[in-house]
Amino acid sequence: MLDVPNRYSRHVLLEVIGQEGQDKIRNASVLVAGLGALGSTISILLARAGVGFLRIVDKDSPELHNLHRQILYNEEDVYSGLSKAVAARSHLLSMASNIEVEAVNQEIEKNNVFNLLDGIDLVVDALDNSETRFIVNDAIMARSIPYIFGGAVETVGNVMTIIPGRTPCLRCIWPEPSSIVGHARAATVGVLSSVASLVASIQVTEIFKILVGDIGNTIPGILVMDVWKNQFHVVPVEPNPDCSCGKIEPR
Ligand SMILES: [Zn+2]
């Protein structure tokens, strides 16, 4: 009933999407890894765009200091005691009851990451720590699933699209999580709400490109932005021949 043809008409009208692209978006299954600031905006846009299946994963519950940037939650959620995953699922289905949303109230770890990837076409990074990102990075390289890395801290944002077999992975650039220089967390240095929404919107744009099959237009490197200083540039990256991603056995 709520999947009537004109629901997505403003996307279907776009030359870069069209009905064929919208059908691909409808048939896609996306894993949203983390439901903080990035995960809020990402999952709202994906749900409203009609992505057919979202698996949303986070182990935390909403807190009052989340609300300035985590736009999926409201004050009631903070006091409800519900997990972010369960609260998020309810809100997403109120926006798009015609899609399927699976809420997973867990931390992503080595022992569950492959289960979480089952049936998934694409993973989007909305995580807040490098260790978990590297668990996801290694798993998506092993399963050959595209992964949209994103980060926002202070007034700076980064986005990198990782397509196994075509682009470098996180380890090609930073061999270990501890080698990511300057990856301070929002809890210690803060994050501007608008930069988080911007990073998430760019990540979703990359998702749309991949889902409709326009891989050639994805970001060719790491997009680095400082929205306060009006700086936007793409840093080229190359696959590292010594990276373990070239030697991963599929599982
Ligand atoms: Zn690599």
Image (cartoon, grey):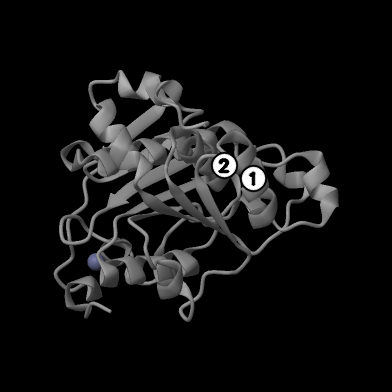
State whether residue 162 is above or below residue 174.
above
Residue under circle 2? 154
| C-alpha gap between disc 1 and disc 2 | 5 Å
The disc, 1 or 2, on the residue closer to the chain's N-terminal end is 2
Amino acid at the residue labelled 2: Glu
User: Given the image, on which type of amino acid does mark 1 rest?
Assistant: Gly
Q: Which mark is residue 190?
A: 1
- Quarter of the rendered structure image containing ligand 1: bottom left
At label 2, counting other C-alpha atoms closer than 10 Å, the crowd grade (few under 14, some 14-19, many 20 or more) is some
State the image coordinates of residue 165 (x, y, percent, origin top left).
16, 61
Quadrant for residue 233, please give it. top left
Considering every residue shown, the one lying at the far right of the view is: 79
| CB under 8 Å between discs 1 and 2 | yes
Q: Which residue is pictured at 33% across the width and 48% down the height?
A: 160
Question: Would residue 70 be found to the left or right of residue 62 on screen?
Answer: left
Q: Residue at x 27, y 38 (%)?
A: 209
Please tell me in which quadrant of the rendered image residue 26 appears.
top left
Q: Position of residue 249 (x, y in %)?
A: 21, 80
